């Protein structure tokens, strides 16, 4: 009985397995038949459509603006150093950081006692040299007169000898008288030689005295120069910085006191890439004196001044790239040495270019435009410049087309979109340009501006005038409150 039960169970399992296999074969065959007949067994799918913001492409002439960042420098800077060693006995009231001085102003004085003593000694030596020269000149005059007297005496002796010889020839005189006259003439000639020697010595004494006098004058001039070096004066109108001096301090020669900066002779140094530098060259490969705009952002207010490119750095510093340019600033209103500013340079105009948002250009250098049936098409363009959040591009087939302003990962070539044109949708409310301030808020802002010493005086006055009006620029208020920490 047990054997029969097991046999019947095995037979049942075999029949069930065969049935399941037959059902699977039938199902597979039916699916293949349905596919061959074109049936999908479900509802037809719909093409997905995405929304995209588009705008027409406008071609025209654009002036690219080269933007760089630079530092304000002074074209005229002088280091103030101790001209002599000694004790500082005087420091001017305006000799401090930020102090404005005029050319010739006395800034500091070093104890002049030793220099004054040396100057007085040199002056006394000069007077001695002048007296020596005067005495030598008088001795020379006397030597000349003595020489003339000796010559006159020699002439008298010669005439006496001639008379003695004449008397001897006539037999009246004696030979002894003739010899006496000859001896007297010889003595007179010897006296002339002695006087000539004395005259030469007197002339040499005058020359030596003149040389000594020149030496004493040079020594006196040197003493005057050393005495003048005990005073430190401003060489030109400017502003003092890095001041390190105090009364009573013992200083060494050439010790640095401060730096004098000409605040009216400023320039900006800014670095650009080599590609940007090439665009500023003329036909001869020379850097053009292109005008520039220098902008400094001060609490929401832009200090703008004009300048012109004057020169470029002669060499590329180690570890740097590009080119370092220098632009002379015409009117440095509100700018100070060390300010970090933005520099804008207008490049030559580009014809037949389109200005598009940077978000419309893909990393592959292509943009998406609307085609027939609102289907997107991908067009290759040439990127000419990047201008902040915009790009300047050039390409074929752009005129009259609508470009997708913002590319998203779901948009691509062949995708159907629902175009949203500018003005079709409700625009987001813009932030007001000016706002009305409450009295307490206005008072806090005015107090902050008045107490901030870093704001230039003309800018501070302009900001206070704007804060006193009924409507205040919202950008300035936001910047001021951000600095206040509110």
Image (spheres, helix red, strand yellow):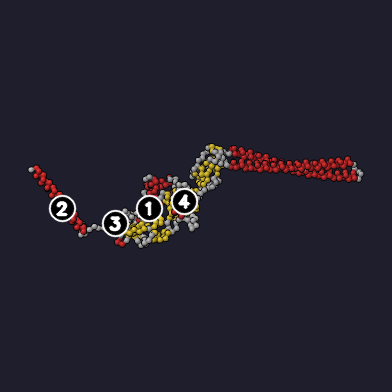
Left or right: where 113 falls relative to 197: left
Which one is in front, 196 or 462?
A: 196
Label 1's element? strand
Q: Which of label 1 and label 2 is nearer to you?
A: 2
10 Å neighbourhood of mark 3: few (<14), some, or many (≥20)?
few
| Distance Cα–Cα, label 2 vs label 3 | 48 Å
User: Looking at the image, which residue is at 31% across and 53% down?
Assistant: 409
User: Looking at the image, which residue is at 81% across and 44% down?
Assistant: 152
| Distance Cα–Cα, label 3 vs label 4 | 47 Å
Q: Position of residue 125 (x, y in %)?
A: 66, 39
Which one is in front, 210 or 321?
A: 321
10 Å neighbourhood of mark 2: few (<14), some, or many (≥20)?
few
User: Of label 2 and label 3, which has the lower sequence position?
Assistant: 2
| Distance Cα–Cα, label 3 vs label 1 | 38 Å
Q: How many marks?
A: 4
User: Of label 3 and label 4, which has the lower sequence position?
Assistant: 3
Q: Which of label 4 and label 2 is nearer to you?
A: 2
Q: Which of label 1 and label 4 is nearer to you?
A: 4
Determine the residue located farthest toward the left in the rendered image: 1
Which quarter shows the N terminus? top left
| Distance Cα–Cα, label 1 vs label 4 | 41 Å
Q: From this viewpoint, is residue 315 visible?
A: yes
Tell me the residue that label 3 is attached to: 50
Tell me the residue that label 4 is attached to: 323
Q: Position of residue 461 (x, y in %)?
A: 44, 49
Left or right: where 122 falls relative to 351: right
User: Of label 1 and label 4, which has the lower sequence position?
Assistant: 4
Q: Which of label 2 and label 3 is nearer to you?
A: 2
Q: Do the residues labelled 2 and 3 touch (CB within 8 Å)?
A: no
Tell me the residue that label 1 is attached to: 434
Tell me the residue that label 2 is attached to: 22
Q: Are marks 1 and 4 in contact (CB under 8 Å)?
A: no
């Amino acid at each position: 009985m047990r054997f029969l039960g097991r046999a019947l169970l095995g037979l049942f399992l075999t029949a069930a397995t065969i049935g399941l296999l037959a059902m699977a074969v039938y199902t597979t065959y039916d699916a293949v038949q349905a596919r061959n007949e074109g049936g999908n067994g479900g509802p037809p799918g719909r093409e997905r459509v995405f929304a995209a913001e588009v705008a027409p492409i406008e071609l025209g002439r654009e002036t690219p603006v080269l933007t760089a960042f630079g530092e304000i420098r002074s074209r005229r800077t002088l280091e103030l150093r101790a001209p002599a060693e000694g004790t500082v006995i005087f420091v001017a009231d305006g000799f401090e950081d930020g102090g404005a001085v005029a050319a010739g102003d006395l800034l500091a004085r070093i104890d002049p006692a030793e220099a004054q003593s040396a100057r007085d000694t040199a002056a006394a030596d000069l007077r001695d040299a002048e007296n020596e020269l005067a005495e030598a000149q008088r001795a020379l005059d006397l030597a000349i007169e003595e020489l003339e007297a000796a010559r006159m005496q020699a002439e008298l002796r010669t005439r006496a000898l001639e008379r003695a010889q004449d008397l001897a020839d006539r037999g009246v005189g004696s030979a002894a008288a003739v010899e006496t006259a000859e001896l007297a003439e010889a003595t007179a000639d010897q006296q002339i030689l002695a006087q000539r020697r004395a005259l030469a010595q007197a002339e040499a004494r005058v020359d030596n005295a003149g040389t000594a006098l020149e030496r004493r004058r040079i020594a006196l001039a040197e003493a005057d120069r050393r005495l003048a070096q005990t005073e430190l004066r401003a060489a030109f109108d400017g502003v003092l910085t890095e001041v390190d001096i105090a009364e009573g301090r013992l200083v060494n020669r050439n010790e640095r006191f401060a730096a004098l900066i000409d605040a009216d002779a400023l320039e900006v140094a800014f670095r650009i890439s080599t590609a940007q530098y090439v665009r500023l060259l003329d036909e001869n490969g020379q850097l053009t004196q292109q005008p520039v705009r220098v902008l400094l952002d001060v609490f929401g207010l832009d200090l703008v001044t004009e300048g012109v490119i004057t020169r470029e750095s002669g060499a590329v510093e180690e570890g740097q790239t590009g080119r370092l340019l220098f632009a002379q600033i015409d009117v440095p209103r509100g700018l100070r040495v060390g300010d970090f500013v933005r520099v804008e340079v207008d490049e030559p105009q580009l014809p037949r270019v389109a200005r598009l948002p940077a978000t419309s250009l893909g990393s592959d250098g292509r943009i998406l435009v609307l085609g027939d049936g609102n289907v997107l098409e991908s067009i290759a363009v040439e990127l000419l410049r990047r201008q902040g959040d915009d790009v300047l591009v050039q390409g074929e087939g752009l005129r009259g087309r609508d470009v997708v302003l913002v590319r998203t990962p779901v948009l691509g070539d062949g995708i159907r979109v629902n175009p949203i044109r500018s003005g079709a949708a409700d625009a987001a409310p813009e932030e007001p340009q000016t706002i009305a301030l409450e009295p307490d808020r206005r008072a806090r802002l005015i107090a902050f501006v008045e107490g901030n010493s870093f704001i230039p005086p003309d800018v501070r006055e302009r900001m206070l005038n704007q804060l006193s009006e009924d409507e205040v620029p919202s950008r300035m208020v936001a910047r001021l409150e951000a600095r206040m920490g509110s």
